[in-house]
Image (cartoon, rainbow, N blue to C red):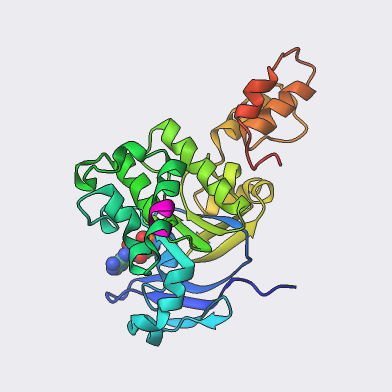
Amino acid sequence: MEQPIISLKGVTYKYPDGNVALDGLDLDINKGEAIAIVGPNGAGKSTLLQIIAGLIPISSGTLTIMGKGVTADNVEKSHELEWLRRKLGIVFQDSDVALFNSTAWNDIIFGPLHLGLPTEEIVSRGERVMEQLGIQHLRDRAPYHMSGGEKRKVSIASVLSLEPEILLFDEPTSDLDPRSRRGIVDLLKRMTSEGKTVIVATHDVNAVPDFATRIVVLKRRVLASGDVRTVLSNESLLETSELDVPEITRLFKVLSSIGYTTSELPFCIDEAVKQIKASSARVHVHPSTVSNMESRCDP
Ligand SMILES: Nc1ncnc2c1ncn2[C@@H]1O[C@H](COP(=O)(O)OP(=O)(O)O)[C@@H](O)[C@H]1O
Ligand SMILES: [Mg+2]
């Protein structure tokens, strides 16, 4: 079997103030996976992403990415991780961290420009990612005057323009309007379908079944890891990890408590539609409505 693209063994991270954010964490991630890292506030999700990105050094344990060790020593000498910066992109929850140019365009092409790519390549990458995110109209606007959602999209574009193989997203759907949120979920799916490895820290449990091929439940260490159905069906795990199920699942739990029978609980709208169609209820669902809601949850 192919080696994991990312492998963490016994990883511990202690903040300088003594706060232990990760404690003996083991996690292997394979190329092409779309992983949702879930867990309560303070579980260590953001810390884990920063460790994988080589931004903060592990206190103990080992981290291997694409077969190469990422040690505390080479995190300190950041030039030694140049290879990692070319392969991996991180989208922070706080977009202000990533945006520092006077226009969105300059932020978006900043990375490719510093890679020394030919001008046509830089321009074509910039235009392509703006189109992917639907932000052509923001091109000449100053990021510091933008709304949170607009800034988020520009910061994602500035990472995608580097065409990384591994993409890390910290709470990418937080504070977005419903249409933008849907756009981000579609983008996460597209990135995986292009063969990229996608790791998303999120508490947006409603979005998880739509993009994730695996859920990892974190609380300083990995409490559980598996497919969406297995993990979200584990009631005692949900309790200990302070996790909720998607709203559609909650609705069906209520319905089954008042006599509506389902063979399996749905975790996304597609599954719910299937359940309803399969039930004796005479419901007509127009096919175009269903195709608009296509999601990972129902491959
Ligand atoms: N800069 C920091 N200094 C000290 N403790 C921190 C710092 N950043 C985060 N922490 C602590 O580390 C733990 C994990 O935080 P974090 O990775 O942000 O969790 P999550 O993203 O899951 O909410 C929390 O207890 C948090 O308070
Ligand atoms: Mg966080």
Any part of residue 219 in sight:
yes
In the image, is residue 242 above or below residue 71?
A: above
Q: Identify the image quadrant of the C terminus.
A: top right
Q: Quadrant of residue 3?
A: bottom right
Identity of the residue drawn at 36% across and 74% down: 56
Q: Nearer the viewer, residue 262 or 273?
A: 273
Residue 196 in the figure: left or right of residue 116: right
Query: Is 143 left or right of 38, judged from the image as shown?
Result: left
Query: Residue 106: where, in percent of width, then height?
Result: 27, 54
Residue lying at 60% horizontally and 53% vertically, measured from the top left: 194
Residue 87 or residue 32, whichever sits in front:
87
Magenta span: helix, strand or loop, mainly?
helix
- Between 159 and 115, which is closer to the camera in this rendering? 115
In the rendered image, residue 160 lying in the magenta stretch gets the answer no
Residue extent of the magenta highlight: 121-125
Q: Is residue 246 left or right of residue 252?
A: left
**Residue at the bottom extreme, as displayed:** 73
User: For the point 63% across and 34% down, which residue is it?
Assistant: 294
Q: How many marks?
A: 0
Ligand 2 falls in which quarter?
Answer: bottom left
For the point 38% across and 87% down, the residue is: 73
Instruction: Give the percent coordinates (x, y) of residue 75.
Output: 38, 80
* Residue 87 spot, x, y in % from top left: 49, 69
Percent position of residue 171, x then y: 41, 50
Asked if one can make out residue 94 in the rendered structure from this viewpoint, the answer is no
The N terminus is located in which quarter?
bottom right
28, above or below 138, in the image: below
Decide: is 177 above or below 199: above
